[in-house]
Image: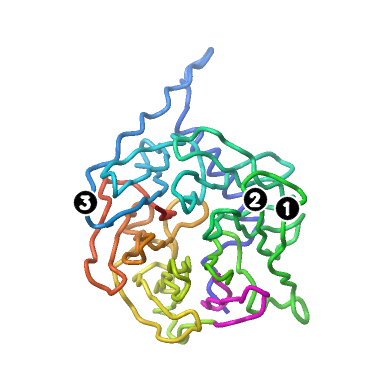
Amino acid sequence: MRPALRTASNFHRAALISALTLLGALLACGSSSDGPTTPDPLPVVPALESVPFGLLGSGKVAFERIGPFSTAYSTIYIIDATAMSSAHSFDNALEFGSALSPDGRRLAYTTYSDNATLYDVYVANIDGTGVQHATHFTGQEGPPTWTPDGAKIVVAASVGSSLIYNVYSQSPVANPGDVTQLTHFAPGAGGSLDCPIIIDNEEPVAVSTQGMLAFACFFGEMDVLSSNGTLSASYAPALGDRRHWPNIFSPSWSPDGTRLAFVQTTSDSATNYALIGLAVNVMNADGSNVTTVASVQASSDGVGGGWIGPNNLSLCWMPDGSRLVFNVPESTLVGHIWVVRADGTGLAQLTSAPGVWDRSVSCSH
């Protein structure tokens, strides 16, 4: 059975709400003396540190940053490699799993809505304006992705109290008649959860130009479904050594839909699930020719490390297909963004601010 790196849905919901409460307390705490309290001002989010734009070629990269812990600001940074500039938006808000639209003009993200629908997907311009409430599932949605043409957002969601997540697509603007269910997962005999089935909703579902889906499943497996929902391919790393246990995160299709990149971690599941290694792998769409293009030392007290929330380990392709961008945990609450060429050359660290947790990368034009 896959180690318990991912939490059950109910725990995840409670943890996210706890994270909101904690961050709110850190960001706006009042005086402890008697009498009326005055909230402290929200932290000022600094401009992004100097980054080597040339490492990215052309296109945009968006990512979430939380921390440092003593300050606990949060924001979404957007790096424009073509313009050699950066900006930030959604300062001091918890916007999980931000995803750039293919044209680089909008962001889709998951955030708390209300007690009725919990966490929903919203869509806004990359400067934070024009916010629109997109999804309204009664259960909890995961971090969204976009179809390659930018016409739809795709999300894993549960309905009601169900712990089974399915994949849905819809227009970026809420339209109840526009929601399409793309998968129809259900428990197996005796309530077993057998692949292909989405393990949870902490990661986005990848969609190719041909309409194929890829996602993490149980037992460290990654599954690929064809556009009609049938299993097309899968990848399952060898299991056996619990001191070096593999897990799969964040599959991402190449722009032409012929290859899948994904993060494969190694953890010590025999003791404390500490993360001890991270690799970026690429394979053909049919599951063949799995190769490692980058291997980076990683560390944390837990498998994913970092702050509570979706997409703690993430990866994306730059729009010309030449580079892969991903985040690396360095300790429990510290991690940064890295980049490597798709042929395995040019591995380099992109962000470097001290004491921060960078995650949830997305790439676009």
| Residue 218 among those drawn in magenta | yes
Q: Amino acid at mark 1?
A: Asp
Residue 271, compared with residue 79, is above or below; it is below
Q: Earlier in the sequence, mark 3 or mark 2?
A: 3
**Where in the figure is residue 316, as x and y percent of width and height?**
41, 61
Which is in the foreground here, disc 3 or disc 1?
Answer: 1
Image coordinates of residue 199 in percent, x first then y, are 60, 69
- Circle 1 packing at 10 Å, graded few (<14), some (14-19), many (20+), is few
* Mark count: 3
Which secondary structure lies at badge 2? loop
Residue 178: in magenta span: no
Where residue 9 sits, quadrant-wise, is bottom right
User: Residues under labels 3 and 1: Cα distance?
Assistant: 42 Å
Tell whether 185 sits left or right of 235.
right
Q: Which mark is residue 52?
A: 3
Residue that carries the numbered disc 2 in the rendered image: 171
Cα distance between the residues tagged 1 and 2: 7 Å
The residue nearer to you, when weighing 103 against 158, is 103
| CB contact under 8 Å: marks 1 and 2 | yes
